[in-house]
Image: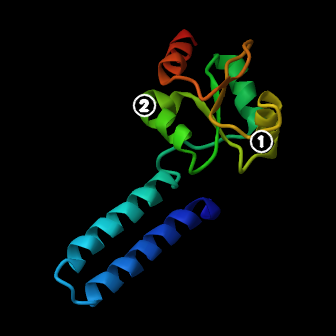
Amino acid sequence: MVRAWTLPILLVLTGSALAFGLISEGNPGGTVAAALLLGVFLVLAVVNSPLLFPGSTGAREALRRSAVDGRPVVYWRPGCKYCIRLRIRLGRSARRLHWVNIWRDPAGAAAVRAANDGNETVPTVVVTGRPPHINPDPGWVREQLSRS
């Protein structure tokens, strides 16, 4: 869990240090620039934090749960803009999916490579009994979720 927060904490600290440097220069526009810069670093920290994505499970556990409840499995990785887009556009319904972080689960990374000709292209969504979908439309994922 500590590793999951390392990058966001580094982003906040870096943004704070840069903002402090701008403010300490004494330029009149430095405060505004510092606030904008800090805001950008805070957004990056949230996007790369565990706050945006539901808790990940291992690939084997996610597939087992999916076989029982029929909900899709989403393979993702931190910092992926397409994964973030999918997560945000799904809204609250994203919590009902099974999320597998391929950077934390070697079996998940292997499943993604097998579905994508050796590439780790995410998000890759797997619905039991269907071929994997790479970077699917959020509406399609919502439809699959409503069928489960």
Q: Tell me the crowding category of disc 2: few under 14, some 14 to 19, or many 20 or more residues within 10 angstroms, Cα based.
A: some
In the figure, 126 relative to 26: above or below?
above
| Residue 119 picture quarter | top right
Direction from residue 78 to residue 91 in the image, left or right: left
**Quadrant where the C terminus is found in the figure:** top right
Q: Can you give x and y, in whole percent of width and height, for residue 92 in the image?
A: 42, 31
Direction from residue 11 to residue 124 in the image, left or right: right
Q: Which mark is residue 89?
A: 2
| Residue 21 picture quarter | bottom left
Q: How many marks?
A: 2
Farthest residue to the bottom: give it: 25
**Mark with earlier residue (1, 2):** 2
Q: Amino acid at mark 1?
A: Ala
Identify which residue is drawn at 67% across, 40% down.
57
| Residue 56 picture quarter | top right
Disc 2 secondary structure class: helix
Disc 1 secondary structure class: helix
Q: Amino acid at mark 2?
A: Arg
Identify which residue is drawn at 55% across, 39% down.
83
Q: Marks 1/2: CA distance?
A: 24 Å
User: Mark 1 = which residue?
Assistant: 109
Identify which residue is drawn at 50% across, 41% down.
84
Identify which residue is drawn at 27% across, 72% down.
33
Looking at the image, which is closer to me, 22 or 91? 22
**Quadrant where the N terminus is found in the figure:** bottom right
Direction from residue 85 to residue 16 in the image, left or right: left
Farthest residue to the top: give it: 147
